[in-house]
Image: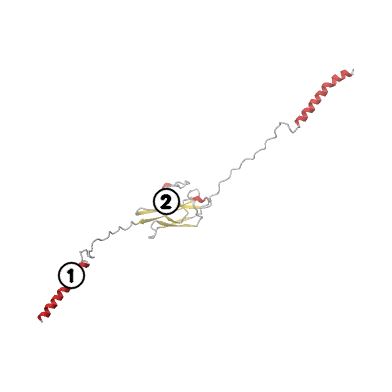
């Protein structure tokens, strides 16, 4: 076999080997367009809501009625004592009081139902001495319910109440006119009294002169 024939036989094998070498080098090149594997994102664990304050077992609420000096203010005692803060404080470990004015909570609330906000007859407060506002004269009753931060009453419901009467203000007495006496008579004015005294003195003087002339 001639050298020319061997050349033509070896040429295809050399071309194939060169093509394989070039493909391998391109695949390993940094400029390769192959994308790296995507990084897996770990799943997000939901955050548990903060635990609310626990209502002590056997808790009681005592409500003292208003006094004469503060006719629309009641005083509350919670036993055992708990941390009382306004709902706006956002402290899950606190509680607050709900003053139901002339509204029976046992008739308007259901188990697990939050106490409504924005009702003028229900006062949300952390104060144990609470002014109930302007009340009409007459008999009234107020109930006090202990609730958690979410305004849900303790279970079983802890409630105390008291009744009281708002006395109407006294009717003002109109001022007296004229110069009447305590018995309601006309009475005598100072000018008339002075005139009467002057007449009496004059009469006595005239009488004395007459007696002196007779003597």
CA distance separating discs 2 and 1: 70 Å
**For residue 67, what is the image quadrant?**
bottom left
Q: Which residue is mark 2?
A: 100
- Residue drawn at 78 percent across, 30 percent down: 25
Residue at the extreme left: 214
Check the image and report above or below for 108 versus 77: above
> Could you say which disc has been placed on residue 120 in the image?
none
Is residue 148 among the parts visible in the rendering?
no
- Residue drawn at 42 percent across, 51 percent down: 100
Q: Which residue is mark 1?
A: 196
Residue situated in front as seen by the camera: 176 or 212: 212
Lateral position of residue 190 relative to residue 132, left or right? left
- Residue drawn at 89 percent across, 19 percent down: 3
**For residue 21, what is the image quadrant?**
top right
Q: Residue 111 appears at what percent x and percent y?
A: 46, 47
Residue situated in front as seen by the camera: 207 or 107: 207
Lateral position of residue 127 relative to residue 172, left or right? right
Q: Quadrant of the C terminus?
A: bottom left
Residue situated in front as seen by the camera: 22 or 191: 191
Residue situated in front as seen by the camera: 86 or 176: 176
Q: Secondary structure at mark 2?
A: strand
Q: Secondary structure at mark 1?
A: helix
Check the image and report above or below for 73 versus 41: below
Q: Residue 20 appears at what percent x and percent y?
A: 79, 26
């Amino acid at each position: 076999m001639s050298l020319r024939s061997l050349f033509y036989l070896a040429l295809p094998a050399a071309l194939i080997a060169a093509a394989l070498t070039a493909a391998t080098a391109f695949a390993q090149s940094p400029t390769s367009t192959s994308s790296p594997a995507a990084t897996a994102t770990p799943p997000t664990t939901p955050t548990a809501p903060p635990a609310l304050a626990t209502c002590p077992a056997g808790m009681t609420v005592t409500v003292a009625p208003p006094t004469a000096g503060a006719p629309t203010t009641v005083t509350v005692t919670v036993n055992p004592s708990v941390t009382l803060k306004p709902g706006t404080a956002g402290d899950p470990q606190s509680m607050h009081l709900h003053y139901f004015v002339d509204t029976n909570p046992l008739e308007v609330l259901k188990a697990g139902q939050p106490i409504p906000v924005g009702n003028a007859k229900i006062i949300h407060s952390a104060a144990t001495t609470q002014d109930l506002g302007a009340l009409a004269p007459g008999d009234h009753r107020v109930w006090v319910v202990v609730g958690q931060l979410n305004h849900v009453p303790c279970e079983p419901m802890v409630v105390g109440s008291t009744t009281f009467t708002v006395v109407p203000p006294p009717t003002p007495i109109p001022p007296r006119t004229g110069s009447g006496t305590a018995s309601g008579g006309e009475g005598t004015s100072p000018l008339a009294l002075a005139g009467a005294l002057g007449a009496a003195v004059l009469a006595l003087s005239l009488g004395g002169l007459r007696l002196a002339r007779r003597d």
